[in-house]
Structure formats: C-alpha cells, structure tokens
Amino acid sequence: MRGLALVLLSLVALLPGCGFETARDEADDGNSTSVTGVLSGEDVAEGFPRVTGPREFEFPADHGAHPEYRHEWWYVTGNLEGDDGRRFGYQLTFFRFRLVPDEVERRSGLATDQVWMAHLAVTDPAGGRFEHAERLARGAAGLAGAQPEPFRVWLEDWELAGHDGEDVMPMTISAEEDGLSVQLRMQARKPLVLQGDRGYSRKGPDPGNASHYYSWTRLDTEGELTVDGERIAVSGESWMDREWGTSTLTEEQTGWDWLSLQLSDDREIMFYHLRREDGGVDPHSKGLLVETDGAHRVLDLDEVRLRATRYWDSDDGRARYPVAWTLEIPGEDLQLVIEAILDEQELRNGFRYWEGAVDVSGSRAGQEVTGHGYAELTGYAE
C-alpha cells in the first residue's frame, strides 16, 4: 500500500495548479512532500475561496466536507491504556485536497478535482515501536468522501463515523492495515469549542491566511488496538480537530510546533508556535485554554512561554525535532514539563512530519498537575 500511495502522490504532483508540485520541490527527498508547501503559496491559491473572517457555523453541515476550499482535515489523536496499564498513542487523520479552483469537464465516474489522503499511526513505547500507514484515493466512485448526515468520513474501509444531527456523538473509528488497527468508540465529555476568533483562526498578516477551526478537546475513548497482530483492549482520551481553508500559511513561515494537552485538573490547552524563516516565532502564534466547564479563551503568544529542551535526530540525519519542552502560563500560575513517550514518532509517507504522544507533569498554583497529549512538528526535514 505504501508503494501505491507514493505512486498516486507522484501522479497528483504532476497536475498543474494544485500546489503539490511546489511542495514536492521543497521536500527533503523524492519520497516525501512538504506539509507547509501544500498549505501555503499565493500563486496556487488564486481562484479558490478564502477564509477571511468569522462566520456562523452550521451544524451538522459543517461536520461534512467543504469541497470548494483547497484543503481540509478531520484529525483525531489520543492516549490510551490497556488493562495492564500499558501505554499507547494513536492518530487517525483524513485529509481532503482540491486540485484546481475551476470546475472541469468530467467524462467518467472516476474524474474528480478532489484527492483524499489518510494517516494511521500507533505508538507503543513499551515495545519501542511506532507503526504508521498511509492511503490515498480519488474523491470519486465512492472511494473517499465526507457527509454530515449521518456523519461519516471515509477512505476505502478506513472510517470516522457518528450520528445524525448537530451532536454526532458517539463517534467510532475503524482502520486497519497490515497487522495495525484501531477500533474505537468516542464520547464527548465537553462540547466542541471554536478556535481563534469564533472559529476564524488567523495565521498570517493577510486575512486570507486563515482557516475555520473547531475542536473536541476531551473525548472519552474505549475499544481495541492491534499492534503487530496483537489485539489489546484499551481506554483513555482523544482529541479531535476540524479545519478547512485555502492558503493557511505565508511564504515566510517554515513550519509549526503544535501541542494539545489534557490535564489532570480537567482543563485542556492547545498552543502552537508558527516558525519563520529568520528563526523567530510568528506573532500570529496562539492557543486556547478550556476550563473544566467547557468555557474557553484564546491564549495569545505573549501569555505563553514555550521552550524546547531536548531534540531527537532522525536516523537518516535529515531532520531534527524537539521532543521535550517546558510550557509556562504565568497568568495561570501554571508550569509544565512535556516529554515525548517515544522519541521516534516521525511519519515518513507521502508527507514527512513528527506526530506523537506526550506526557505532561508540573504544577498549578503550587498543586501537582499531570496529563498527556499530542505534538505535531512540521518543517524540520532538510
């Protein structure tokens, strides 16, 4: 399947105007595409609709696809435990890309301007293993897609599904590939939250460098994982992000460090640094703090001190990622230490990036705080 995915991605890269050809030029080698390359570029954004300000969300419709925009994703990550206390992290993500802004004549049922990609990953720190898989498909002939009622996102037999109506909970996850699988059921403990300014997440000086973005920050989760053919009953917590737009990043932004943290005091934190070519942090970096009752507020860059304290080098020497951090929010009297549960959690499929489970320890107002979460790191491959 990996070989097929790379062939399909190579074919996509040949299509004019889709942005993948620029991204591949920026890739670290012939087998990977730059994430930031696909999400930036004013030249390839021309003709697509742009996210330029807040809007009223319409549920359940917004749980489904927005095919007119250039890119979109349904992103689920989580930390789980077996009955014996064995730790796991997992990721299942569905990505949709529109290749050209104009409608094209379709002469067959396979013709489409939509390409879908999905990533599955499981981290097993006790076994020292990080397993991942990728699939790609056309958005035609029922191969891949997303619908709001009943809620369903799929690529072949990989699926994220829920119920009719605005509240799609509970949701289920089902994905399997070569002895690796996740079969999970999720129920929201808190309502979804709108990121940024009422769901308008601006990431650059131009109003169009933005996305519509909302999250479920605490999903009670149970089910089964299969790792290397071993089936394990698990339970824990997940986090789901929903985002869509056209040109999210600027040309000067080289990548991001994104963290989602679920703390033992029943609060959640999302925070990201957008990194610039000059080595600085973009002022549009920000985050979100969710209280125990679901109330939430934006965290501006000047409220949060995030610092990397340890790094991991990939075995081919082409990427160096931070894998431990300190995070402080002085206004909340909060000090956290964040550490990857396994250093080697780098995906190397059509895209190359680090996405992995983390542990959290620290204090708030002198009281101990622990937790877990996920980190996503892009733009580090040379």
Image (tube, rainbow, N blue to C red):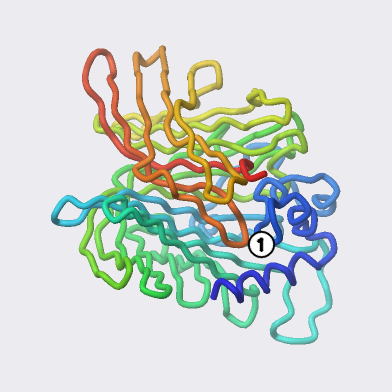
Residue at point 52% right, 50% down?
315
Residue at point 53% right, 47% down?
314
The foreground one among 47 and 6 is 6
Residue at point 40% right, 72% down?
176
In the rendered image, the vertical position of residue 52 relative to residue 175, given as above or below: above
Quarter of the figure with residue 73: bottom right
The foreground one among 74 and 123 is 123
Total marks drawn? 1
In the rendered image, the vertical position of residue 219 relative to residue 266, given as above or below: below
Residue 276 horizontal side relative to residue 161, left or right: right
Quarter of the figure with residue 228: bottom left
Residue at point 53% right, 61% down?
94
Residue 189 horizontal side relative to residue 194, left or right: left
Q: Secondary structure at mark 1?
A: loop
Residue 199 placement (x, y as % from top left) = 56, 39
Residue 220 horizontal side relative to residue 73, left or right: left
- State the quadrant of the C terminus: top right
Point out the residue furthest to the left here.
Answer: 84
Residue 323 placement (x, y as % from top left) = 45, 36
Disc 1 residue crowd, few under 14, some 14–19, many 20+, Cα 10 Å: some
Residue 211 horizontal side relative to residue 120, left or right: right
Task: Identify residue type, mark 1.
Answer: Asn
Residue 341 placement (x, y as % from top left) = 34, 43
Quarter of the figure with residue 330: top left
Residue 301 placement (x, y as % from top left) = 55, 21
Write down the residue under mark 1: 31
